[in-house]
Image (spheres, coloured by chain):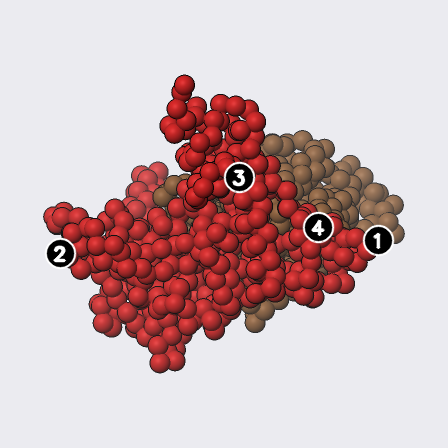
Chain colours: A red, B brown
Amino acid sequence: MKWKIVILISYLMCIVILTGCFDANELDQLAISLVVGLDLENDKLLYTAEVIDLRYSSEGSGSINDVSVKYVQGTGNTVYEAFRDIPLKFGRRIYGAHIKAVIFGEDIAKKGLVPYMDVLFRSREIRESAYVIVAKGAKAYEVMGINSGSEQMPANYIVSVIESIEHNAKTIDTNIIDFINYYYRMGQHPVTAVLEKKEKLALNHTGEETGTQEFELSSIGSAVFKNDILVGYLNGNDTKSFNFILGNVNSGVITFPTPVEEDGNLFSFLVAIKVNTKNDVLLENDRIILKTKIKIKGYLGEVEGNIDITKGENLEKMAEACSKTVEEGIKSTVKKVQQEFGFDIFGFSHEFHKKYTNEWRKIEGNWDEIFAEADFEIEVDTDIISTGLLNKPLTVKEK
Amino acid sequence: MGKTKVKDKIYTHQAIFLITIYRSMTPLTYAPLLKSSFANQDTWFMILLSIPYTILYCLPLLYLSNKFMGMDLLEYTETITGKFVGRILETIYGIIFLFYLTFFTTSFIEILNSALYPNTPPWVNLSILIVTVIYIVSKGAMNIARLSEILFPILFFTFFMLLILGFEDYNFQYFFPILRDSTFKQLSLGAMLNSVYYIDILILVMLTSHLEKKKDLNKVFIHSLLYTAITTLFASVAIQATLGIAYAKYINFPFYNYARLIRIGDTMGFDLLYIITWMIGFIFRISGYFYITTVTFGKLFNVDERKTYIPITIIMIVVALYVQGKTTIVTEKIISPLFVIGVGSVGIILIPVILLITYFFRRKSIKSENTGSSKRN
């Protein structure tokens, strides 16, 4: 019995002591990466990684303007080769388990992303939940390293501007898994987020000290792919319309002309709190009609113009104006996509597939052409459920 | 196996837990149906449809085990076919059990290496596995069954927790249109494929003699079948709704990938929870196959089961290290999935059908032999 206890204790000790000893990832030997960028440079792949500077973190010193990250680059014929080129210059292996976003330079996106994505799926470290972003009109490394937000690290700044879809649907948050599913699903092409480097108005004087504050990143708009090849961009409003059709707008803002007979451009502002989208496809005498029905619930965030919204009919006019703006915006986006791109990014194909399964089998190979020629109908219904803390605009004077 | 000791009794619920854990390891590890060419948005229906197919597939074995209540698979094989042919069939069963034992061991080592410990030499994982397995098996069938009572709630609580935690990422749109793209043939072939992976009935029919209530054999089978169908269904829906139907076909270990994607705020790493429970479940499954392999070879060579531990362990080590050092088990280079299914079908369908036919021809003489032997006893 004694021997059994001794053996058991030794065995348990071995398990405790030896656990992960071969695969130990010591913090001081890793380069923890949060964002990576992929570019083509002289026909070679250039892998740029933003890594946390652990020295900065461990010392616990430094002001907010101190650089808490480093940028490392590697080149190679494949992504993995470029990735493994980094330790030769940096001395540490890139640890990818915390990668939150993968940025592709425009040049690589125009060649097609999927061949370069293999490593993102094959690697056990990188999670498929990382965002896919295209550096609009730039190399990936050109949009990295900019931190114009209040985040301590540029990577978190990038993630926060993408996740701002919560507040404004002029961007999109496609991740790796979404991208690959768009790619595989017949009849819907991928759309991803973009990052654009923009010069910032020189209001913030601290920028002069660090040199990193003169630019900011804009995630307004989106990148449109045919299969996995970048073919163009949608602007912010089109991206918002795209998000409306996809049902991606959970909250957000809608700016619409105030329904008053005054001169000048007077706008009001609805904060959507609930948006329901229902897409449908009709097949009538060999004619395909794409249909979208959107129901918006929200409250007024801002009212310009002399309109007394305490009156029911005026509030109704405001709701109609909002609906009309959304309708027109979406119609224009669908038309633009049909004419400029000529393929379905909205997923109407799935509605057709669901409803007309037998017909779908005959046309699935030609859906893009059919989509480009299809009619589009939209119906938007807005309910304004609150006017905020004011019941009428301040411009309406009480007599 | 010989005479079953009183202390080696297995209660009905323990047997249900045991078989459910063993079988659930297949969808939670490889999810073969999701990677097959039959997989589409109607895979969930194939899983439900596989219930009657599984009953049909296992019917010969179930019938014989019910007919020879109180005997295990090897015992009634010999009773039906006689000593000489019985020995041959027992040898075949021994090889089948050994095949699955080495297959699961190699898979275990490979999954650990590719998913968790890429730099750990296979022999380290193998050593830990073997010591644990031998310890579990040395405690006998009753303790294996008792262990299932402890493991079942742990494993299934974790499984359902992971399903709930990942719910936010589910996209049920992938499952449309429902049952309109698949033909009945495709649904049936998918269902059949899912049912032929129910090889764990071999464990059940090897443990029949240990069951406290031998009449509950069918109950154990049906309950474990339903529970595993539910597990397979939930796992498949979670995987396909999260990873997409097409992408799921490309993944070696789909539920692991699903668990990797779970994220609550900035908290990630729920895959570790899966890996820990999966390791426990898989080691437990390997223990079951190790147990029936030692019982079979012990009986074949007429030696104490414990004496077969070393040779069987050596075979496990040699095969696992050879495969691990040479290639990967997930490709068809060494073993095609069809071969894995084929081996199971020999043990579950082919031999039992032969036994069944022989039984119908010889049932009178078998009855008189049994009556004679019971009188002598």
How many callouts does the rendering have? 4
- Which residue does the numbered mark 2 point to in the structure image? A209
Q: Secondary structure at mark 3?
A: helix
- Which residue does the numbered mark 4 point to in the structure image? A281
Q: Are marks 1 and 2 in contact (CB under 8 Å)?
A: no
In which image quadrant can residue A200 be found? bottom left
- Whichever of callouts 4 and 2 sits on the residue coming sooner in the sequence is 2
Q: Is residue B60 visible?
A: yes
Q: Chain of mark 2?
A: A
Q: Amino acid at mark 3?
A: Cys
Are labels 4 and 3 on one chain?
yes
Q: Residues within 10 Å of mark 1 (few under 14, many from 20)?
A: some
Q: Chain of mark 1?
A: B
Are labels 1 and 3 on one chain?
no
Kindly report the distance in space between the C-alpha atoms of the residues bearing marks 1 and 2: 90 Å
Specify the farthest residue to the top. A399
- Whichever of callouts 3 and 2 sits on the residue coming sooner in the sequence is 2
User: Residue B246, percent across and down?
Assistant: 60, 58
Q: Chain of mark 4?
A: A
**Mark 4 or 3: the one toward you:** 3
Task: Please give the name of the residue rendered at 21% of the width and 54% of the height, measured from the top-left corner.
Answer: A202
Q: Secondary structure at mark 4?
A: strand
Kindly report the distance in space between the C-alpha atoms of the residues bearing marks 4 and 2: 57 Å
Image-based side of A242 in relation to B75, left or right: left
- Which residue does the numbered mark 3 point to in the structure image? A322
* Residue A229 position (above or below residue A124): below
Q: Which mark is residue B357?
A: 1
Kindly report the distance in space between the C-alpha atoms of the residues bearing marks 4 and 3: 25 Å
Q: Amino acid at mark 1?
A: Ile
Image-based side of A360 in relation to A142, left or right: right
